[in-house]
Image (cartoon, rainbow, N blue to C red):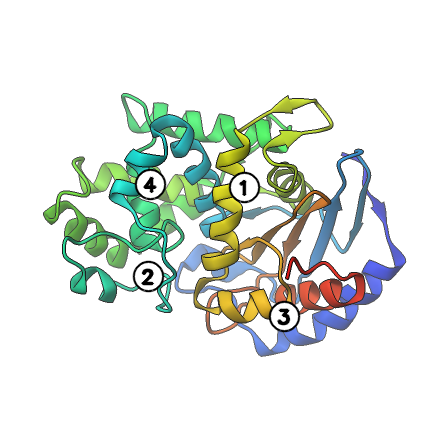
């Protein structure tokens, strides 16, 4: 995809890059710890096919939690609204994304939303297919469609690194299995989930996917409806209420657009009816969000009045 560099965006990126010194890369997953904390880039994809960018937008990174929105869209299409929300809730938690605390207090135990790890594991569990490979291939194919690029794959190094350090997610899986939210082998689900999180792309791809969500599931460039409008609406709502971990409320006030972050430093934004945004900045704040990416979106929203509210 061709993308024009933009002087105004360049200036905003350089201003936001100053904040990278206050963040840290996600070295609790060893392979993610290799990222350059000073990286920062952005692409904006418009429905008419135009794209503007700043920074090294070709640099690849893994989706991590950003994938949760996409797996939710696929599973809503696979299973339907009633079945999905029988097993996972719709409420923000206020807790860290990997917390088990609320699960222990709920009767019956049910993850509060699909954007925390417990909820995302239940959603990934519901991807249809007869094997881990078939389920992963279906998710990857859907992501390739959304990004309009069949070359998108996953990082085996990062998937393996995550699998080897996934003890907390293992604990969540066993807890969920004990309470009949999962009925497959924990290692099979973790194998699928870590590959999902390790799907790799660049800012241009992420902006294209954000644009599809922004346009109610339609890719206006190919004229294909890639997901039902209602599915896109539900996903965007979760992006507003839960997409930025337990900083989602503050983000809604300061930025006010549907967005989802991941601990590799990616942020996908979907400005309803307008455009998609892809950001990469691997230095994270204490909530797990790209510290400079958040600041960049705040400046962008203020300068161009992007807030929905």
Q: Cα distance, mark 1 to mark 3?
A: 29 Å
Vertical comparison of 45 with 99: above or below? above
Other residues around mark 1 within 10 Å, as few (<14) / some (14–19) / many (≥20): many
Q: Earlier in the sequence, mark 2 or mark 4?
A: 2
SS at circle 3: helix
Badge nearest the viewer, 1 or 2: 2
Residue at the spot of label 4: 123
Residue at the spot of label 3: 254
Other residues around mark 3 within 10 Å, as few (<14) / some (14–19) / many (≥20): some
Cβ–Cβ under 8 Å for marks 2 and 3: no
Q: Report the front residue among 231 and 260.
A: 231
Q: Residue at x 35, y 47 (%)?
A: 120
Q: Cα distance, mark 1 to mark 4?
A: 20 Å
**Residue 200's disc number:** 1
Vertical comparison of 25 with 136: above or below? below
Cβ–Cβ under 8 Å for marks 2 and 4: no
Cβ–Cβ under 8 Å for marks 1 and 4: no
Q: Earlier in the sequence, mark 1 or mark 2?
A: 2
Q: Cα distance, mark 3 to mark 4?
A: 29 Å
């Amino acid at each position: 995809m061709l993308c024009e560099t933009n002087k105004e965006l360049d200036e905003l990126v350089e201003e936001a890059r100053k904040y990278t010194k206050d963040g840290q890369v996600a070295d609790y997953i060893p392979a993610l710890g290799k990222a350059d904390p000073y990286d920062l880039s952005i692409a904006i994809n418009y429905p008419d096919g135009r794209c503007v960018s700043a920074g090294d937008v070709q640099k690849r990174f893994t989706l991590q939690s950003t994938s949760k929105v996409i797996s939710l869209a696929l599973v809503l299409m696979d299973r339907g609204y009633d079945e999905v929300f029988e097993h996972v809730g719709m409420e923000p938690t206020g807790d860290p994304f990997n917390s088990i605390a609320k699960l222990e207090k709920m009767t019956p135990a049910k993850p509060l939303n699909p954007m925390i790890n417990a909820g995302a594991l239940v959603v990934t569990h519901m991807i249809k297919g007869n094997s881990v490979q078939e389920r992963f291939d279906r998710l990857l194919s859907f992501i390739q469609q959304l990004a309009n690029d069949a070359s998108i794959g996953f990082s085996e190094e990062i998937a393996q690194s995550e699998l080897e350090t996934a003890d907390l997610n293992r604990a969540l899986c066993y807890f969920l299995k004990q309470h009949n939210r999962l009925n497959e082998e924990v290692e099979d689900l973790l194998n699928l989930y870590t590959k999902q999180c390790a799907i790799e792309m660049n800012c241009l791809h992420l902006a294209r996917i954000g644009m599809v969500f922004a346009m109610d599931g339609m890719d206006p460039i190919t004229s294909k409806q890639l997901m039902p409008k209602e599915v896109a609406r539900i996903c965007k709502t979760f992006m507003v209420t839960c997409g930025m971990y337990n900083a989602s409320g503050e983000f809604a006030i300061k930025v006010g657009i549907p967005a989802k972050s991941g601990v590799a430093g990616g942020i996908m934004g979907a400005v309803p009816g307008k455009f998609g945004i892809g950001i990469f900045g691997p230095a994270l704040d204490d909530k797990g969000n790209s510290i400079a990416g958040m600041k960049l979106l705040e400046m962008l929203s203020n300068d161009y009045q992007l807030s929905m509210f």
